Image (cartoon, rainbow, N blue to C red):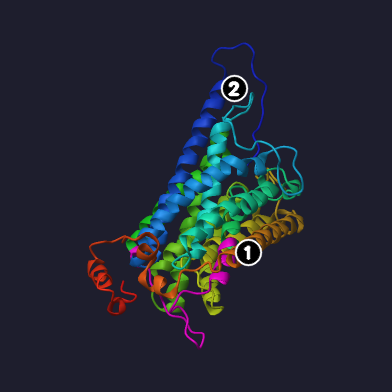
Amino acid sequence: MLGKLTWMPKNELGGFIMEDVNFLMNSVWTMLGAILVIFMIAGFIMLEAGSTRMKNAGHVAGKTIFTFGLASLIFWAVGYGFIFGGNANFFVGMTDFFFDGKEVEGASVSTTVFFVFQLAFAAISVTVALGGFAERAKFSVYVLFTILFGILVYPVVAHWIWGGGWLAADGAQDFAGSTVVHLTGAMAALAATILLKPRIGKFNKDGSSNNIAGHNQVYTALAVLILWVGWFGFNAGSTVSVDGAFFGFVALNTNLAAAAGAVAATLISWVVLGKPDIPMILNGALAGLVAITASCAFVDVWASVVIGFIAGIVCFYGAKFLESRRIDDPIFALSVHGIPGIWGTISTGFFATPELASVGKAGLFYGGGFEQLGVQIIGVVAGGGYAFAASFIILFVMKKAMGTLRVSAEEEIMGLDLSEHGSFGYPEQMKEYEEALKKESITPNLGRE
């Protein structure tokens, strides 16, 4: 991501000048990107709802809207200042808290538009993180973790890479957030799923796993399409400029990587499982999008296909590996956002071209040696490691203070729609279940989907 605003002298002659036109066009384009990224929240709602069971669908939808609102307020109060504020220390910036909406004279894009754009990225990262809590965490845990993640986790990694921090000084390449947004969220999700433990019925005593299928694959397919379209705001919008229509090149790389990811995941699941697996097809497309997010502005078109194709494969095997380690990841936060996020960030160390490397240096395959590859690996280890460690500590302290992060076994079996909110996401389908509960006899319908 271009991150910092660029500056230009103001023409004092007044009138309708080129700088004014560029400012307005850049601002409109970036605002469109912000709208597309915010609309990705709709995709995540449908993805999580479709990937979980019917009894938790309303909970998933409601908590996602709530946490987007809460994350927005936290970003306004402190997140933006920690990322882009001045007087920075090793970790974060120290000015621009409680953003006042004032425009900066001479900026090439509206400061307020840039703020909204960055807010959308922060919201996506916490949404990814909360996927690791699915179907078993208390609503109060979402509330507190969203606040602490928005203060102590996301802004730190974002400052290091986008806000002029030490990784930026080293030339780390992460154009739109494979590490900053996706890996950061995924590492928080990993910390959550470790501390929360697997859902009831996911694993057997012998270590084997049971498939707990989501209740609506049509929802998840539509979700992926919404996210795919929204990603053009994510990646192409990160140019924050219309200069030279470079956003078109970024969009092309983005689309081809997603396409390659979907095809690769289809093929590998077909070969290994004997049939093309629908959830894996969808996850492959998302994995390709996550992977190309770091490199979309730094690599040639052919490389975007390779990056996306490899992402689809590592997504498939990543999911299998995590399940073998008894890690219950209902929304595939780790196999879709984590592992492809690592690959996508490292990929620029191989494929970044001298002509496109506006940040850092060319990759290994273009005569740059191992220097940029080393920088990318350091970025992954530092960013991902910090996000995991900080999130684990936050959740561990929360668990000690609250007694538990998880709903009771009875509440989990009942479903979070009812236990956490007192209503059903699908009231008609759950009518029989509700009648049984009124008679104080939930046994006949335990776990009913």
**In front: 244, or 328?**
328
> Image quadrant of residue 49?
bottom left
The magenta stretch spans residue 395: no
- The image shows residue 190, relative to residue 202, as above or below, that is above
**In front: 343, or 83?**
83
Q: Position of residue 208 (x, y in %)?
A: 48, 84
Residue at x-position 65% and y-position 63%:
393
Residue at x-position 40% and y-position 50%:
42
**Which mark identifies residue 167?**
none
What is the three-letter code of the residue carrying label 2? Glu
**Which mark identifies residue 19?**
2
Q: Position of residue 60 (x, y in %)?
A: 41, 59
**In front: 11, or 163?**
163
The quarter of the picture where the C terminus appears is bottom left
Q: Which residues are magenta?
A: 188-217
Q: Which residue is mark 1?
A: 397
The magenta stretch spans residue 201: yes
